[in-house]
Image (cartoon, grey):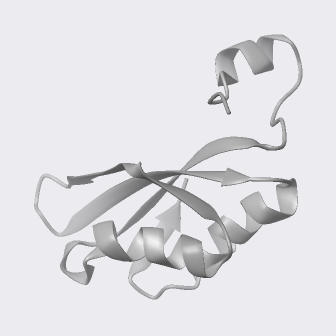
Amino acid sequence: MQPIDFTKAKQEGKGFQFPGEFEITAVGSASADLPARVPQLLEQAGLKVLHESVRHRHSGGGNFVSVTVSFRCENREQYDAAHVALRECPDIRYTL
């Protein structure tokens, strides 16, 4: 399955195309082990996580970390479920 070319899709007026691979970024507490927990939370929500895609970056002050993960989903409901699953975690401030 090929990753989504969002620029091309936007130019063609297509938006999200399902099924597909998508990225999600969670931002939260640096002390919460989010690089390990974010993929686990997504899998618990029933999503296929692409573990080789996991990357993270600490904030300048070191208090926060952003974790970006790619995952596969079949429909918009699964995509929305990924955001819900991460936002329910008290250590995650927001998702992108």
Left or right for 64, reference 39: left
Q: Tag count in the figure?
A: 0
Q: Nearer the viewer, residue 73 or 95?
A: 73
Say above or below: 84 vs 70.
below
Residue 3 pos. (x, y %): 62, 30
Q: Is residue 18 left or right of residue 56?
A: right
- The foreground one among 84 and 22 is 22
Work out which residue is located at the far left of the displayed protein and give it. 61
Task: Name the residue located 65 percent from the left edge and 66 percent from the top edge.
Answer: 47
The foreground one among 81 and 72 is: 72
The image position of residue 42, as x and y in percent, is 56, 71
Q: Is residue 86 visible?
A: no
Q: Is residue 69 visible?
A: yes
Residue at point 66%, 51% (across, down): 72
Q: Residue at x 58, y 85 (%)?
A: 88
Q: Nearer the viewer, residue 19 or 31?
A: 19
Q: Position of residue 39 (x, y in %)?
A: 45, 68
Q: Quadrant of the N terminus?
A: top right
In the image, residue 6 above or below residue 25:
above
The image shows residue 24, relative to residue 86, as above or below, that is above
